[in-house]
Amino acid sequence: MTGGPVALARGARRKILRQHRDLRRVLDITLSATEAAEAPAARRLPLLVALALRLQNMLDRHFAFEESVLIPHFLADDPSRVDHLVDDHRRQRAELSVLAKLAFQNVSLPNMGAAFRCLIEKIGADMEGEERELLNGVRRRGADSRQRRVTGEFAQDALLDCDELLATSDPRRRR
């Protein structure tokens, strides 16, 4: 991205940052699930499907909000940024959709986990870039991101309880 920070209303900035925090939580859980999916005899693809669906839902809502807030600023300052933002969002939606469909079809590709990890890293890097370039940087606490709870608007998603799914699908974490 080019250009400087965007002058957003404090509430809009906070909402984007909260959504990023919540997305990171689910991305971290998905990353853990992808590592286990490649283990011998592991049947974690249903978990990846559930997590991919959760991410699709969260990203669709986040992208819609982000575009509604950022595009008016970009149009005034640098219209080329609109194309960049929309193209990034479109690409991430498409990649996640393909991966979710492959996981749903139980396609056990040797690089399924690697494909998820690559997309997760791209989404994380895009959020870092947005925070650094558009939102004047963000200081993160050093706490392990897996200890955070999903809050805000995403907390109401009843699609799945990621912690519970991880605990029940990993024999080492069962009670």
Image: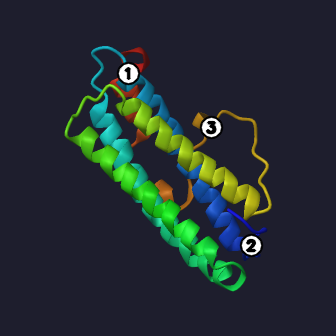
Per the image, the residue denoted by label 1 is 170
Per the image, the residue denoted by label 2 is 6
| Identity of the residue drawn at 56% across and 51% down | 22
Upstream in the sequence, badge 1 or badge 3?
3
Upstream in the sequence, badge 2 or badge 1?
2
Q: Residue 83 occupies which quadrant of the picture? A: bottom right
Per the image, the residue denoted by label 3 is 145
| Identity of the residue drawn at 63% across and 58% down | 18
- Count all numbered tags in the image, as a single digit: 3
Way the structure is coloured: rainbow
From mark 3 to mark 2, how far is it between C-alphas? 27 Å
Q: Is residue 58 visible?
A: no
Q: Mark 3 and 2 residues: CB-CB less than 8 Å, in contact?
A: no
Q: Mark 1 and 3 residues: CB-CB less than 8 Å, in contact?
A: no
Residue 71 is situated, as x and y percent measured from the top left of the image, at 60, 78
From mark 1 to mark 3, how far is it between C-alphas? 20 Å
